[in-house]
Structures are given as C-alpha cells and as structure tokens.
Image (cartoon, helix red, strand yellow):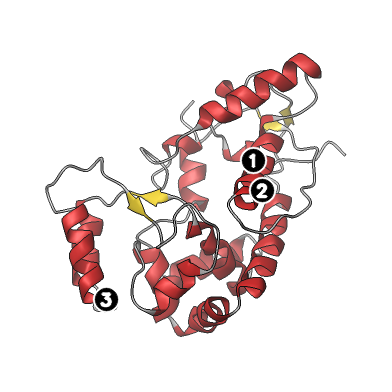
C-alpha cells in the first residue's frame, strides 16, 4: 500500500522513522497490543518540539492505526510547499482549522530542514518577496539542474524551536513558497507579525493547534498494530477514531 510517506508533499522528505520503530518495539515488549503507532507519532511530535525548546501540551491518547493506506487521500489533505496562502487557508478550513491555526502550525518549520527541487528553486528565484542576499544563498545551495539531495535549514535556527521562523518571514527569508506567502498575504500577515514579536503567543497558539490537529478523525476502522512498519504512514493512522 502506498501511503502518506509517498505523498507528493512528503516523498524523499520524511525520515527517522527508525525512532518510531524502536519506541514501538520497546512498548510491545512491555505492554503488547496497547499503544498504537498513531499515538506514538503524535507523542513523538510533541516531545520533539518540547526537547528543542518549544511548548509542551497534553496529548490525548487512544488512537487506532489505520487498516488501509492511500497516497491519493494524503495528497488531498497534505499542504504543498508550493501552495499560496489562499490554497492553504481553504485546505485548513476543510479540516475546521482557522487561519490562526494555519499560521501557528506552519511554525513547525521552526525546526527541520528542506530540499528545494528545480521548480521550487526557479519559483524562489522569481519571488520578489525574497530578500536578495537570501535568494543568492538559496541559489548556491540548490542551483537549477544541480545535485538535489542537499538540504538547508527551514529557518535561521533549525534545531531550536522558537519564533525565528516568523522573524525570518518578516525580512523575506522564507525557504518555501508556502512559508513566505504567509507574510505577503493580507489574510495571514497579522499573525506572522504577532508571532514574530511574541514568542509566548506563538507557543500557546501552536499547542492549541496541535491539540486540534490531534483530534481530527478519519471515521475509518482501525486497530493497534504490532509493527509500525506495516502502517506505511497511512493518514488514517494519524486521524482515526479514539478507543476511549
């Protein structure tokens, strides 16, 4: 089954699933068939944020792992790095997530790295909102027709969860189009400016958004899988009915 790992927004991007596999293996030794892979992924996301300096929030537990996987379903709900603010707002609205949720959750790009492909490199080169010196840095890192297995930080502090991501957007240093568009769009600009000034406001909004995101349900049947590898990143794994 081709699932979320192979979705257009994720392909050749998601990594470190061996960490999830290790956690699952140890849990299965202690309490087999109790903790789902979906719950592990949600808790790992929370802990990754907390351990890099960001907020911590209570994660609701009891998700089931999906029984099927669908790349098409994932492509329909996964935000594209090429998307503009209008597209992102519409996508989040379908999931009953607000514009504030969109901007705050985009702050997850405070940590991590990204790879630009040729079409994205050309788009960034032509984007008038990009700060000129930063544009030159991106062109050197990811030249058109260059080696495409090179990554760069998503913000100025890619291993620290902070509000530098938003400060970078304000000065035209968004790595992805889906990042910089949040500052150039009037619907989202005010939240970018607020979070760039007030890190605590960003942390609170991010935690609230993650709780909402974790509450999304697919409505599909599921079970607690004994091995996370077979789940293959199904969207149903992250958005399934709660056991309790």
Q: Is residue 106 above or below residue 172?
A: above
Q: Secondary structure at mark 3?
A: loop
Q: Residues within 10 Å of mark 2 (few under 14, many from 20)?
A: many
Measured as percent of width and height from the top left, residue 73 is found at 52, 43
Which of the pair 187/15 is nearer the observer?
A: 15
Which image quarter holds the C terminus?
top right
Provide the residue designation for mark 1.
44
Q: Is residue 21 above or below residue 243?
A: above
Q: Rounded to the nearest whole Å, what is the CA distance between mark 2 and mark 1?
A: 5 Å
* In the displayed structure image, the side of residue 136 where residue 90 appears, left or right: right
Q: Secondary structure at mark 2?
A: helix
Q: Residues within 10 Å of mark 1 (few under 14, many from 20)?
A: some
Q: Residue at x 65, y 51 (%)?
A: 50
Q: Residue at x 68, y 35 (%)?
A: 40
**Label 1 vs 3, first from the N-terminus:** 1
* In the displayed structure image, the side of residue 167 where residue 115 appears, left or right: left
Q: Which mark is residue 131?
A: 3
Provide the residue designation for mark 2.
46
Q: Residue at x 33, y 76 (%)?
A: 172
Measured as percent of width and height from the top left, residue 49 is found at 61, 51
């Amino acid at each position: 089954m081709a699932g979320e790992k192979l979705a257009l927004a994720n392909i050749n991007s998601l990594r470190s699933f061996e960490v999830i596999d290790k956690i699952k293996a140890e849990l299965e030794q202690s309490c087999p068939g109790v903790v789902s892979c979906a719950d592990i992924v949600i808790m790992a996301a929370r802990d990754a944020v907390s351990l890099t300096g960001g907020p911590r929030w209570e994660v609701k537990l009891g998700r089931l792992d999906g029984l099927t996987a669908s790349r098409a379903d994932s492509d329909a709900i996964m935000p594209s790095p090429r998307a503009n603010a209008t597209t992102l707002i519409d996508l989040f609205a379908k999931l009953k997530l607000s514009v504030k949720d969109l901007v705050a959750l985009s702050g997850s790009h405070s940590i991590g790295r990204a790879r630009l492909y040729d079409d994205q490199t050309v788009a960034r080169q032509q984007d008038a909102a990009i700060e000129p010196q930063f544009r030159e840095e991106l062109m050197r890192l990811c030249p058109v027709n260059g080696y495409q297995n090179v990554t760069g930080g998503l913000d100025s502090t890619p291993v620290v969860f902070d509000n530098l991501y938003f400060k970078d957007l304000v000065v035209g240093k968004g790595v992805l189009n889906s990042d910089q568009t949040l500052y150039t769009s009037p619907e989202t600009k005010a939240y970018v400016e607020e979070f760039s000034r007030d890190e605590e406001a960003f942390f609170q909004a991010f935690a609230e958004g993650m709780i909402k995101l974790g509450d999304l349900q697919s409505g599909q049947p599921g079970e607690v899988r004994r091995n996370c590898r077979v789940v293959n990143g199904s969207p149903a794994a992250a958005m399934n009915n709660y056991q309790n």
